[in-house]
Amino acid sequence: MEILTIILGTLGGVSAVLTGLFAYFGNLRLEKYKADLETTNTKLKGFLESSVHVSKAQFDKEFSIYQQIWVLLVALRARTLFLRPFAESVDPKETEEERMQRKLKSFGEAFNAFRDIMEENRPFYAHSVYESLCEIFDLCGTESIEYQYREPGRSQDYWEKSIENNKKIVAAIDSCCELIRDRISSLSVA
């Protein structure tokens, strides 16, 4: 009977020691987990507190840039599409070469103003919008080159290419407009 009491006492003691060890290591692990959560929480709070001000400043800057770009983009679209219009009034005193130079000059002013604002503000607005603006810039530049170095006598191909370029330009501008809208709506200021 004494042996049974000793065995049960020993097993109870081992059980108590094991239970104590599990509780101790469990508490250590729980405390480490709490400390990790507090560290992460502190980092996130700091990030959110600093980003509210930055986001507001960035929103204001981007919005201002998009307003400038859009005004210039509207002018560029109009002057690009005016290079090869389907109908226009012509001054009989102006030669075809003079008319072409006048149109190209007007286009060039809009093209250069657009390029300058687009590039000067590049770091301050979304890269996806910049890429879209570059596509428009290239399409408009191509149209002006095709207009400037056109073949004498306007063939069916000349007008077909004009229509194709115009559609691409308008579609690219519409796509850019949607990117700008999406970008503005995605910026939230808390």
Image (tube, grey):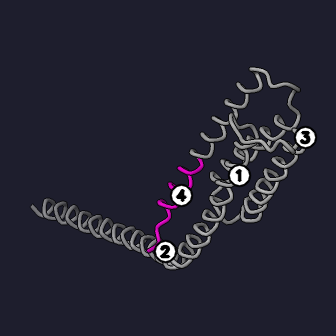
Placement of 190 over or under 103, stated as above or below: below
Q: Secondary structure at mark 1?
A: helix
Residue that mark 4 sits on? 183
The C terminus, quarter of image: bottom left
Q: Tell me the amino acid under the disc marked 3.
A: Glu
Q: Position of residue 88 (x, y in %)?
A: 71, 40
CA separation in Å, label 4 and label 1: 22 Å
Q: From this viewpoint, which residue is outermost toward the top? A: 156
Q: Earlier in the sequence, mark 1 or mark 3?
A: 1
Q: From this viewpoint, which residue is outermost toward the front? A: 92
Is residue 51 rendered to the left or right of residue 133? left
Q: Which residues are magenta?
A: 176-190
Residue that mark 1 sits on? 76
Placement of 20 over or under 182, stated as above or below: below
Query: Which callout, 2 or 4, points to the residue nearer the camera?
Result: 4
Query: Which callout, 3 or 2, points to the residue nearer the camera?
Result: 3
Residue that mark 3 sits on? 97
Numbered badge on residue 48 = 2
Which residue lies at the image location 18% right of the left edge and 64% below the top edge? 6
